[in-house]
Image (cartoon, rainbow, N blue to C red):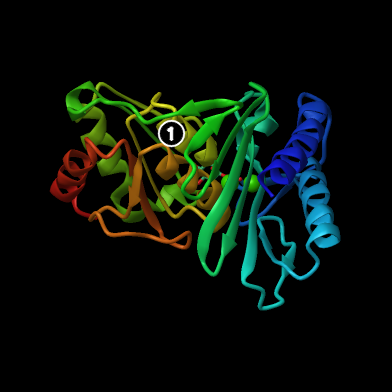
């Protein structure tokens, strides 16, 4: 199955790459920050058409509204374009993210970093890869030497879960904080040891599903801000290389919510 997921991610990625920098139609979703382009929709259609044809009995949850509910033990969780704001503004950091769950557990995942042409992939129990190369999380063991990354949800103006205070505290404590704009890529940079920690509030299942397995299979850990196990519906996620996880949680707790 992983080869098929890679193939369809590349096809969707090609649509996105071809659309980048062109004149495309943009609509607003919950507010003026929350965009959807015709390219998001075209990418989703390509992926969903494939699943419906190849695996007609499987369930689907996709960001732009495609939903199949068959009570299947399999669920495909699809973000057809993660990083739409970057895409719409001409910043070449965005991805396609697909996770496949069986009975609620993610068993296969692909995140395609479209402009770098890198396929991140993982199957449960088999490690994580960037193209053909096995990847692992970093060995950084002190938060003071860590490079962290975060993102903000579209209701950022409400400062949900004290996101701004947490941003300040973790920025002061770490070597640096980044905000790339594609949660799926943030997880993959944890997996490949570029970032040591990634935290965000109010992500959606399609932002989390693929990237979480890729980070975990590379030796990382993904929990809430108290260190509890999470599923793809969690509203608080903290991913790290394991070694600095508790140090990040300590700073989180100093701030509260
Ligand atoms: C967004 C990106 C971004 C994160 C937002 C997400 P979208 O997804 O993952 O990094 O900060 O919370 O909603 O809307 O571009 O698919
Ligand atoms: Ca997303
Ligand atoms: Ca999206």
Q: Is residue 181 visible?
A: no
In the figure, residue 100 lies in which quadrant?
Answer: bottom right
Q: Viewer-proximal residue, 185 or 41? A: 185
Which of the two residues, 43 or 32, is positioned nearer the viewer here?
43
33 over 68 or under it: above or below: above
Q: In this rendering, would 110 be left or right of 136?
A: right
Q: Is mark 1 within 8 Å of ligand 1?
A: no
Instruction: Look at the picture and state if 65 lies above or below 39.
Output: below
Looking at the rendered image, the quarter that the C terminus falls into is bottom left
Please identify the quarter of the rendering in which residue 93 is found.
top right
The residue at the point 79 percent across, 31 percent down is 14
Task: Return the residue at label 1.
Answer: 191
Instruction: Give the side of residue 150 with respect to residue 33, left or right.
Output: left
Q: Is residue 16 visible?
A: yes
Q: Position of residue 219 (x, y in %)?
A: 36, 38
Q: Would you place residue 229 above or below residue 126 in this image?
A: below
> In x, y percent, where is residue 205?
53, 57
Q: Position of residue 182 (x, y in %)?
A: 54, 37
Q: Residues within 10 Å of mark 1 (few under 14, many from 20)?
A: many
At which x and y percent is residue 115?
67, 23
Disc tally is 1
Image point (37%, 28%), residue name: 195
The structure residue drawn at horizontal position 50% and vertical position 50%, both measured from the top left corner, is 124
Above-or-below relation of 199 to 74: above
């Amino acid at each position: 199955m992983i080869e098929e997921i890679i193939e369809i991610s590349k096809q969707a990625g090609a649509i996105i790459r071809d659309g980048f920098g062109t004149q495309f139609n943009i609509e607003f979703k919950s507010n003026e920050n929350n965009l959807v382009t015709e390219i998001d929709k075209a990418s989703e259609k390509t992926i969903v058409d494939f699943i419906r044809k190849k695996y007609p009995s499987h369930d689907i949850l996709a960001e732009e509204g495609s939903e199949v509910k068959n009570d299947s033990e399999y669920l495909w969780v699809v973000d057809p374009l993660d990083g739409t704001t970057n895409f719409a503004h001409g910043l070449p950091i965005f991805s396609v993210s697909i996770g496949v769950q069986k009975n609620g557990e993610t068993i296969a995942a692909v995140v395609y970093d479209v402009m770098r042409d890198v396929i991140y992939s993982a199957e449960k129990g088999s490690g994580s890869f960037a193209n053909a190369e096995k990847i692992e999380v970093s060995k950084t063991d002190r938060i003071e030497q860590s490079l962290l990354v975060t993102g903000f949800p579209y209701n950022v103006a409400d400062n949900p879960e004290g996101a701004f205070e947490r941003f300040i505290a973790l920025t002061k404590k770490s070597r640096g904080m980044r905000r790339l704009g594609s949660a799926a890529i943030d997880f993959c940079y944890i997996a490949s040891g570029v970032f040591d920690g990634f935290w965000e509030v109010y992500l959606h299942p399609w932002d989390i599903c693929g990237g979480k397995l890729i980070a975990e299979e590379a030796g990382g850990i993904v929990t809430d801000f108290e260190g509890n196990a999470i599923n793809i519906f969690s509203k608080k996620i903290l991913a790290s290389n394991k070694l600095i996880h508790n140090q990040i949680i300590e700073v989180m707790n100093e701030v509260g919510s």
